[in-house]
Structures are given as C-alpha cells and as structure tokens.
Image (tube, grey):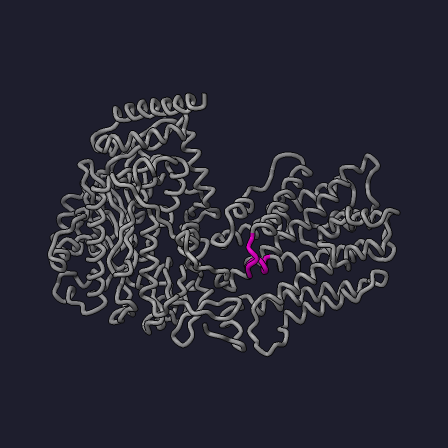
Amino acid sequence: MASHALSEGLFDAAAHAARWLADYRERVGDGDVVASGDADAWTAAFEELAVAAGDDLAHAQERVQRHAEDIGTGFRVAGDPDERPWPVSPVPLLIAEQEWCGIAEGVAQRAGLIEAVLADIYGEGTLISDGAIPAALINGSPLFLRPMVGLTLPGGYQLQFAAFDLGRGPDGEWRVLADHLRAPAGAGYALENRLATSRTLGGLQGRLNILRHAPFFTAFRDGLAALCKRAEPRIGLLTPGRWNASYAEQAHLARYLGFLLVEGADLAVAEDRLYVRTIAGLKRVDALWQRADPRMLDPLAFDSHSTIGVAGLIDAFAAHNVLISNAPGAGVLEAPALQAFLPALAERIIGAKLKLPNIATWWCGDDAARATVEARLDSLMIAPAFGVNPLGLPDGAVQGSELSAEARQALLDDMARRPQDYVGKELVRLSTMPVVADHQLAARPFTLRVFAARGVDGDWTVMPGGFARIGEHPDIRAAVMGEGIWSADVAIYSPDPVPPASLLPAPDSTQIRRNPGTLPSRVADNFYWLGRYLERGEALLAIIRAMLGNSIDADAGAALDHDTVGRMAGLVVAAGAAAHPAHLKRPDLVQLARTALDALDGWNNIPAINRMARTIAQVSRDRLSADVVRLLDAPHPTKGSMLDRCGSLQRRYAALSGLAAEHMGRTAAWRFHDLGRRVERGLAVARLVRTFGMTGASSDDLTTLLDLADSQIGYRQRYLTGIARVPVVDLVALDPGNPRSLAYQADRIAEHLAELPVLNDDGLPEEQQAEARALCALLSTASAARLDVRLLDDAERQLAHLSDAIARRYFLQGAEPLRAGGLTLA
C-alpha cells in the first residue's frame, strides 16, 4: 500500500513536471537556458520542483523563501532601517560541467590579467609610460590610492578574491559585464542560496551530481593562511557594521569560514602590528578579509574623515605584519573605462585574447572613441567612467535612446567639457531562465556573479556556480535589469558522482578544541547588554501585567490596596516607561500600561527595550542562533487585548531565557550575557524589596513582591500559615537557593567574574572581582529582620559600581588600547 502511494506520488510529480516544462518551452524563445539546455537535466529539476510544490508552484516559492529566512539570509537597502529577506527563486540555473569549465578558465585568466595590470600600476608603471593605459585613466580615478604606489605586498599579490558579473547572450556566448575587486560581495549569498535550494529540492544533488561549494571556500581560507607569517594565523573579516547592505552575508561567511567578524573599533595597531581588542587584552591579527571601502581603511593613509578604519593599518601592511585581502587600491580596475583597454592589455601581457570577452566599451577621454559614442548615442548605454555620477548623468547610467531632448543636450554639453568622465557601452541582450511568478513559470533575464579565489599554490580557484540575479521584467536588455529582483542558485551538474565535501573536519579526525576562540571586547559588551535589556524588559512586563490585571478587576472588587497599585505605577514611571498618571483610577492605569507596553516613541518602555535588544542581535549574528535572532526580530504583537499581548511577549522572553540557559555553550560570551541578566535582576529585586518589603508592608504589598519576584510557589511550599514580612524578605532578598533572589544574583556574578580572564598575574582580585566579593559579603551577613532601606541602597549602589567596573575592565573605552597596565600582546 505504501509502495503504491509512493509510486503514484512520483508519477504525479513527473506528470506535473512534464506539463510545466512543455508549457514553458512553448512560451520562450531560443535564448532561454531551458530551451537550449540539456533536456534530461531540466526534466530532473522540474520533477524535484513538482515534489516540493505539489500542484501549486507558489508552494515551492514559499518553501525556499522560508528556508532562506531560517538560515538568516537578509540584505539592506540604503536608507532602510530594517533588513529585507533575501529573495530566492526555487528554480536553480543549471549549467553543464563542460560548459562551466570554459567559464572557469575565462574567469581565472581574467583574474590573472587584472593581477598583472595592478602590479604594474602600483609598481613600475610601464603600461602608463608606454601609453597602453592613458595616465588620466589612473590618476583621475577616485579608486586609485596613491599611497600604495611602490609598496611591496605581503604574499606578493594584489588580489586574493575577486568577483565578476557575466551575461549570457541569446546565442549562448558569455561576456563580462563588470569586475568587483575592492570588497567583492555575494559569495555568502551563493552559499545560502545553495542551502535553501537544496533543502527545497532535496533530491537534485544526487540526481545531477551537482558540484559543491565547500572546496572553493577551503581553498580560499587555506590560501589566506598560507600567506601569513604564523603557522596558525588569526584571520578576521572586517565589516563596516550592521548598516552595510550585505552585513548578514558577512556574518554568515565569518561563521562558515571560522573567521573573526570585526569592526574597525575592535582593532588597534601597536608597533606596526595589528591587534584585536579582546577581554583578555590585545591579540595578534595576521590577515584581514576586508569588506569596507578601501579608502576608509586607515584615516592616516587615506581618508582622514574615516571613522570605521584603523589608524596605522597601512603601516602594519607595509611592514608585512598583516595581510589585507584585497590590497587597498585594487578597485582602480573596477572602473568601467578600463574595460575598453583590457582586450589589448591581454594580448600585450599574456599574449592571448580574453576567453571571456568584455562587452564593447568606448572611453570618451579618447577623441576617436568619443566621436563614436556621440555618433551612436541612441544605440549605446552611457555610463560614468569611474562609478561616480558626473553632471550629465545625475541618475547614473542611461540608455541613449531614452534620453529626453533636454537631458540629451545636458549630457552632450558635459561630455564636451569633461569627456574623461563618460563611457559608452553596447546594449547587451540577455538569455532568460524560469522563475515562479503568479503561480506559473515565467521567463526572466538573468546575470551571473562568479567568484574566484587564490589557493595555497597561488593559482586561481573558481567557485563551481555562484548566484544568478534575475530581472523583474521580461525585457532582455541588461540595461533595464538593474540589480534584479530575485536570486537563484547556480548548479553545475556533472556526469560523474561528486564526493562529499565540507569545511568540517573529517569524521575520524582526532583534533579536539574546547576553547571557543577569541572574544572581542565589543562582542562581550553586546552580550552583556543583551542580557540586561532582556531582563529589564521581562521585569517591566511583569509589573505591567500585575498592574493591568488589577485595573481590569477593579470593578469586581478584587483590586489590590490603593497604595500597592500606586507603588507599581511608580516603578513603571521610575523605569522611564511612561509619565506619571494624574490619578490612579482604572482608566489612568490602563493608559499607563498601554504607554509602557505599546508606545513607539518611548525611550525605555517595552518597544524601546526590544528595539535595543534587536539592534544588538543584528550585530551579533555570527554568534547567536537563528532561533534567537528570529525571536528578537519578531514584530511587536498588535492583536488581542493588552493582557493577551503581555502574555505573548512574556512567552517570547521565556523562550529567549530558555535558549540562553539550555542552548548557549558555557563560553565567555555566555558568561557576559548571564552577567548582564544577573546585574539587571539584582537591581530590580533590590528596588522591589525596597518598594514592597519594608516595615509596615501590607499583605497586598507582600503578595505583589512574591508575584513580581516569581517566588509565590517557593514561599507557599515553605510557609503554610500565610504571608509574613520577614520570611518574604528573606526568600526574595537573602536566600542563596532562590534563583530570583538578590543573594543568588550576587553569588552568580562572583562566580562568572572568577572564571573570566584577568590581566594581572599577582594573584590579587581585580576591581570587578573585589566589588562582587564585597556585595556577596554584604548580603551573606545581612538579616531579614534587620534588612532596611539603607542596606538595599548600598546593594543597589554596589551593583551599579560593579557594572561600571566590568565595563572598564572588559569593554571598549573609546580609543584606549585596552588596559595598557597589564597589556599582553599575543
């Protein structure tokens, strides 16, 4: 019975696939990859798509998008406050291995040519002196970094990683559309596309023997390591920060490759060596894979206004003490104007034509080329020569035939004044590939981004695949595609079985590592404050729920004492979550609760606290699980009653607390996260006891104190005769066995600080350790019967001093080179 159902399911999938494929081929032209590709390969792909989609292709689109979101794939558009989900198509681009070999050879040849040209530009300069490259093309480029001229480079190479955008014409010929050399983006998206697509089309890998990405990333990582001086180098991925468009990709790559994700503020140069600021002092960095604008890397060498660079970095680079990939200045060959000269340079330098030709390009700085562009203006694409929009192209590249008469004249006038700022490019017609649109397959134009990396032997390795960017409209001109609206996995299929490959060690490897690695001070700071914000939000939510429940029940006669309610409202106001109400009537309390729970303009209410926690999560994606990031990114609940929304948020806080307690490894990062929770909880408990547990407290006060300290059950198990002040205070403030008590928080804080690294080797406690011990002593010698406001004030003050001491010892303090008094350079 089961076997019959399975075969019937396979038959249905095959039938759906055959129908989709036949219908699609009827509607596309000869330039489509499916129409001109391997019928068997595409049949297999559509059969797997049918299994994933059932009878509705939209299901496959939803599945692959959900997998991409589970992986954590996202990107940011300039000006947007939030990341957008990375758009993935469930239909991969299939390319046969034989065809791919030609593409890979052309990419490797082009990377080698660009390396040679860069070496000459920043070295002897013979290409410029001989006239092979016009001097104005280099000296006039904003991407040319003059301080790099004459430097000998660590490892001897300008490039270790490069990306190229390719377009496939309707005749099947591949041509280069653009070179990416400064901070090539997208390799992480290619990896994430592969993960999402393989989870959706689970059987495609085995059916088509798709080549894997892991060997490429292994070659790149090992190639960087081989160029470093130390046998076990520390390699960082330098990110501009969370506002960068591809920050999510950078975090994913850092985690996948085992690189340390760092920002400029994490780094410091001392004695021409680069260090990362960590909780254990400065640690040596041997190589940086930089993803920032190279002009921002060092304010002393390049742009003095840079706030994201590292002062002295280029001095360390010039001293061969740190490798930077790619070398600053490599982006000079990204300029579209250079494409006009690369064909001739190829024949001069390597004695061969380019295996992957450029699209035809004319640099208007040459009189003859400018005349050609003006004569053929309606049939060309006019673009900035150096990537910066000149006066005649305020909105960037434009198709000449689409210019208005006024814009056309403005372009020609500025081209006459500054012809060197413009290039003309032929209009490229692109092949199409299938995407899911409106519940059916539709043909859309695509471009392909391919990646090349230098391996251990110095040779270029090309990623088998990359990612396809797919246009929104059926128009097959590359000029109108822009950045595309979808992306797709690029699967290179082979006739031969593909051995499993992974960056993970072999199953029989005996190498063991229990040290989680370097913890930068910025990351420790983030984890500490993530813990504090989550605990602060949870405590505030408990007060809101208690106050809200009381206000709703007021008319039923179940209200708490008026003074108790007033104290709860006072805690909300003191927390900065809302303004103090004029009265303590039910409407006033409901409005106070609504402001603390929902107001978007609050500075320390629930939405504000969640925003701050979400911001920390966004810059810690390489160290937080996808579940934690997803919970923190979840939208604020807007449906249901306020009590329902409070319950939803409380469950979210509980889930985050559970993930931290049961799923985070007991590393230094976890200790800082838990330290933040303990400090914040200790401060909150001290305030609660001072507010509700002092002499004269009513039974309602004590009941509220037990509720807010989450200790009702523990109290009832111990005391069966009702509520008394001293036992309540002892349980909430001084009982070291109650995980919600003030004493328990102090003990855990002291334990964490005893386990964290110290810089002094004299055996004496550091300031933060001494503060923690003093707090423990204060609470362990206190008596519940004699506990008063003064002691609670002292405890709260010591917690605040302790937090400051932790920050001074472990976190970044401006440009301070981190604890020079006990500095160790490792």
Q: Which quadrant holds the N terminus?
A: top left
Q: Position of residue 771 (x, y in %)?
A: 67, 69
Q: Quadrant of residue 759?
A: bottom right
Q: Is residue 672 magenta?
A: yes
Q: As rendered, which of 494 and 312 lies closer to the eye? A: 494
At 42% from the left edge and 47% from the top edge, which residue is drawn? 75
The magenta stretch is 664-673
Q: Is residue 471 magenta?
A: no
In-image side of 496 versus 583 (left or right): left
At 61% from the left edge and 57% from the top edge, which residue is drawn? 674
Q: Is residue 770 above or below residue 137?
A: below
Looking at the magenta stretch, what is its main secondary structure? helix
In-image side of 535 versus 253 (left or right): right
At 28% from the left edge and 53% from the top edge, which residue is drawn? 452
Q: Position of residue 355 (x, y in %)?
A: 16, 49
Q: As rendered, which of 59 and 149 lies closer to the eye? A: 59
Q: Is residue 751 visible?
A: yes
Q: Is residue 425 above or below residue 346?
A: above
